[in-house]
Amino acid sequence: MEPIDLSIAKKMVDHYNTTRKKLIDKEHNINDTQSIWISLDKLKSFINNLPENATGVRIHFAAYDHENEHYPNQTTAILMGTVENDTQHTDAMETGSALLSTEDPMGPFNQGRACPPICS
């Protein structure tokens, strides 16, 4: 992860909003997620509880289904810890591991605050 200039970040976000988000909004007739807020305490807890063999964190883009009470059809992000597998960093989503449970410190984790609808 490398720092980038704020003007470049703004340009990239604008590009996302005028391309991908615009298409999602039109196709699904929604005002899709632009960002996801995660409390620092929860993020630190997730990272601090990763096992010693964790090599990083992968962020999977995902979407709630239309029946979700708070975020119907909205884009979200799933965080998962990774481990080195041969020469690659893999997570349970990729390997089909039975460790996909809420008790696994490697994830998957969700429930940041999606904006929209909650943008404060």
Image (cartoon, helix red, strand yellow):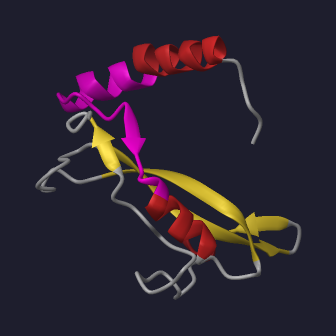
**The furthest residue to the front:** 41
For the residue pair 73 and 107, the one nearer the viewer reads as 107
Q: Is residue 94 visible?
A: no
Residue 9 position by quadrant: top right
Tell me: residue 108, above or below residue 104: above
- Judge from the rendering whether residue 6 lies leftward or rightward of residue 100; answer left or right: right
Residues in magenta? 20-40
For the residue pair 49 and 109, the one nearer the viewer reads as 49
Q: Quadrant of the C terminus?
A: top left
- Judge from the rendering whether residue 73 lies leftward or rightward of residue 39; answer left or right: left
Tell me: residue 114, above or below residue 52: above
- Judge from the rendering whether residue 83 lies leftward or rightward of residue 33; answer left or right: right
**The furthest residue to the right:** 87
Q: Quadrant of the N terminus?
A: top right
Q: Position of residue 28 (x, y in %)?
A: 22, 32
Q: Position of residue 37 (x, y in %)?
A: 39, 44
Q: Is residue 16 magenta?
A: no
